[in-house]
Image (cartoon, rainbow, N blue to C red):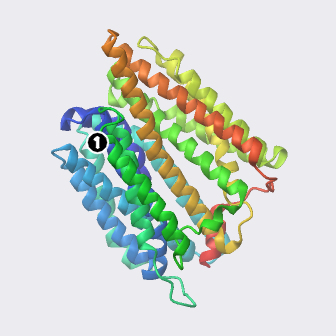
Amino acid sequence: MILLDMTIVNVALPKIEESLGFTQAGLAWVVNGYLLMSGGLLMLGGRLADVFGRRRLLLTGVVVFAVASAVCGAALSPGMMVAGRFGQGTAEAIAAPASLGLIALLFTDHKERTKALGIWGGLMALGGTLGYIISGLLTDLASWRWIFYINLPVAVLVLVLLPRLVSESRMVREKNEGLDVTGAITSTAGLFGIVFGLLQAAEHPWGSARVVLPLVAGVFLLLVTLIVERRAANPLIPLQFFNNRTRSVVNVASLFFMAAFISYTFMLTLFEQQILDYSPLRSGLGYLPLGFAIGAGIGIGTGMIPRFGVKAVAAVGFIGAGVGLFLTSLLDTNSSYLGGILPGMVVFGVFAGSTMPAATNAALHGVTAQDSGLASGVQNTMQQVGSALGLAVLVTLALRYAGDEIQNGVAPDTAVTSGYTLAFRVGAALMVLGGVLIMALFERVNPELRNPTAEVVEVIR
C-alpha cells in the first residue's frame, strides 16, 4: 500500500491538476509533500518503533495513512490535497520501519525468515510497478479519487488481522535513550523551506521575498539541525557516520540519482498526457518497460559485482543512466512512443537498475552490525530528500525556461517540451556527475554482495 502510493499519483497528476486547479509548480507538491515528510521523519519513525513497540507504530501508521488517503480522495482544493499527502508521508515514516522489524521478528527460523523477507521485498517492488497501471485504470475508468480510496479496504484488513496475528515487540535498551525530536523537526522544516522557495521561483523572480525568505529560513534551519545533531546525546544521524568517504559519496550520488529519476517520471507523464494527448491508461501501461528494465538491470548488476567490483558497476550504471536520460531529452512534440520515448526509457531503466545493488553495498561499506540499520536508513532518507529537491529544482527550471520561450513567441506546446527536455539534460548531467564522483572518490569496496535487510535482521535479533 505504501509503495503503491509513491507511484500511483504520477499517472493521475494531469487529471488532479485540472480538477483541483493546481498550477504546474503547485502540482509538484502532490509528490513533494509525501517525499518531504517520509524522508524527513523516517529515522525518527524507526526510533519510535524501537521505543514504543513496532506493532503499535505500524497500526498507528496504517490509521494515519487511511485517514490521509480519505482526505486526498475527498480533496476539494490544492491545499486539502497537499495536506493529505503530508499525512501520507508522515504515515510512511511511522509504518515502514516498523513493518520490516516485525517481519524479521515473526520468523525465527533462518530459512523461513529469508523467504518472508523475500516476499516482503517482492511485494514492495510489485507495489511500485503496479502503481502506474492501477492509476491509469482507475483514472480512466472511474476517477482519480479512487487511487486514494483504494487504500481504505487495505487499511481495514490490516487493522483487523494484525492484532490477532502479531504480538508486540520493542528493542530492549540498557539505558534510557532520548529521542531526537528536535533534529527531526528542524531538518524537515528546513527542507520544506528550501523546496518551497525553489518552487516559488517557477512563478516569481529570484530576488522576490516569496523566493528568498523561505530559502534563507530553510538554510538556517538546516544549519540549526547540524548543531542539534552535534550536541544531541542520541542523534538521529551521528555526524561521524559520514567520516567514511565511500558512504558519503554514495549518499550524495543517491541524492543525484533520485533527483533525476523522480523528475523524469513526473515530467514524462505530463509530456505524454498534455503534449502527446495520451490517456491515463496508455500513459500508465507505457511505464511497464521501465519496470522490466529496472528488474533486468538489478539482476545484471548483482551478477557483475563479484567480477568487476562495486566501484566499476556503480560508476558505469550512473553514467549509462545519464545516457538514457539524454536520449529522452531528444523528444519533441511529434515524438512517437516506440521511436522517441521507449529507447531512452529502456537504457535508463537497465543502467539505473544495475546501480541499485552496488549502491547498497557502498552504503554499508565499513559499517558494524550495530550501524547497518543506520546506514540503510540514511540511504533511504537521502533518496527521499533527493527526490524532493530534484523535483523542486528541475520542475522550476523547466517551467521558467518554457515561460521565457513563450514570451519570445514560441508555441506553448513546443516551449513546454523544450523546458522538459532541458530538465532531462540536467538530470542526465547529475547522473554522469554521480558516476564520476564514484569513480574518483570510492575506496575499495568488498565485492561480496551484502544484503541490507539481513544486516537489519541481525541488529533487531
Direction right: furthest residue: 307
Residue 181 at least partly seen: yes
The relative height of residue 336 versus residue 37 in the rendered view (above or below) is above
What is the number of callouts on the image?
Answer: 1
Instruction: Name the outermost residue toward the left.
Output: 76
Can you say whether 291 is above or below 329 in the image?
below
Task: Give me the residue at 34% from left, 11% from top.
Answer: 408
Q: Residue at x 47, y 64 (%)?
A: 225
For the point 36% across and 61% down, the residue is: 90
- Residue 434 vertical position relative to residue 459 in the rendered view, above or below: above
One can see residue 2 in this view: no
Left or right of 312 in this view: 263: left
Camera-side residue of 36 and 12: 36
The residue tagged 1 is 210
x%, y% of residue 247?
68, 56
Residue 83: image location, x then y, percent: 25, 53
The C terminus sits in image quarter: bottom right
Residue drawn at x 29%, y 32% is: 203
Q: Position of residue 396 (x, y in %)?
A: 39, 33
- Mark 1, Cα crowd under 10 Å, few <14 / some 14-19 / many 20+, is some
Quarter-of-image position of residue 65: bottom left
Disc 1 is placed on an element classified as helix
Quarter of the image where one finds residue 189: bottom left
User: The residue under label 1 is which amino acid type?
Assistant: Arg
Please tell me whether residue 105 is drawn above or below residue 294 in the rendered image: below
Q: Which of the pair 285/78 is nearer the observer?
A: 78
Q: Position of residue 351 (x, y in %)?
A: 65, 35
What is the quadrant of the N terminus in the image? Answer: bottom left
